[in-house]
Amino acid sequence: MMWVGIGIVVIGIAFFILVLLLIAPLNNLAELLLSLRKTTDKLPEDVDQMVGQATKILKTSNQTLQDVNEKLHTLSPLFYIANDIGEASHKLASTLTDASKTFQENTAETKQLIQRENLEGLYGGATLGYLLWKNKQKRKRPFSDV
């Protein structure tokens, strides 16, 4: 029975030493938990502030987006007009290109015909005569263009 008492005393001393060794870490853990509690107590306020700021930002961005949409809506007819002008100018340019190619082909054929028939002198003389005739008509009516 004596051994049992000595064993209990040894266990008690070991437990006392263990408690003394664990006092500092347990105090540190208590401070940490207290600091965590203070932080989590402020958390709802911080979240409310962040949600409020996010709401303001979303409202501002919605207003900006509506403003941009209105401005784009007013500008869209101009874009359609610019598109129509572009298409019309493209059609005109392609028409003029086709006419120029046709004229060039016809001129090339006429040039070959003139060279083949040796009519260069005849056409040159006709051109010279036409220019002299036009010049003579201008001298007769000096102020007719005014």
Image: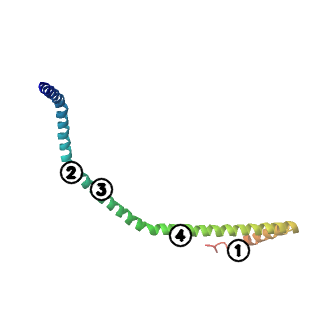
Disc 4 or disc 3, which is closer to the eye?
Answer: 3
Direction from residue 106 to residue 41 in the image, left or right:
left
* Left or right placement of residue 13 versus residue 46 in this view: left
Numbered label attached to residue 57: 3
Secondary structure found at label 2 = helix
Q: Quadrant of residue 61?
A: bottom left
Q: Position of residue 115 (x, y in %)?
A: 85, 65
Compared with 29, 52 (above or below) is below
The percent coordinates of residue 6 (x first, y second) are 13, 24
The image position of residue 134, as x and y in percent, is: 73, 72
Q: CA distance from mark 4 to mark 1?
A: 49 Å
Please give the count of numbered marks on the rendered protein.
Answer: 4
Amino acid type at mark 3: Ile
Quarter of the rendering containing residue 24:
top left
Pair 4/2: label in front: 2
The residue pinned by badge 4 equals 84
Tell me the CA gap for discs 4 and 2: 58 Å
Q: Nearer the viewer, mark 1 or mark 3?
A: 3
Badge 4 vs badge 2, beta-carbon distance below 8 Å: no
Q: Nearer the viewer, mark 2 or mark 3?
A: 2
| Mark nearer the N terminus (1 vs 2) | 2
* Front residue (pair 65, 78): 65
Element type at mark 3:
helix
Q: Residues within 10 Å of mark 1 (few under 14, many from 20)?
A: few
Alpha carbons under labels 1 and 2: distance apart: 103 Å
Please tell me which of labels 2 and 3 falls first in the chain. Answer: 2
Amino acid carrying label 1: it is: Lys
Nearest the viewer among 73 and 143 is 73
Please name the residue that numbered disc 1 is placed on. Answer: 140
Rounded to the nearest angstrom, the CA distance separating label 2 from label 3 is: 20 Å
Q: Left or right: where does residue 7 sit relative to residue 125?
A: left
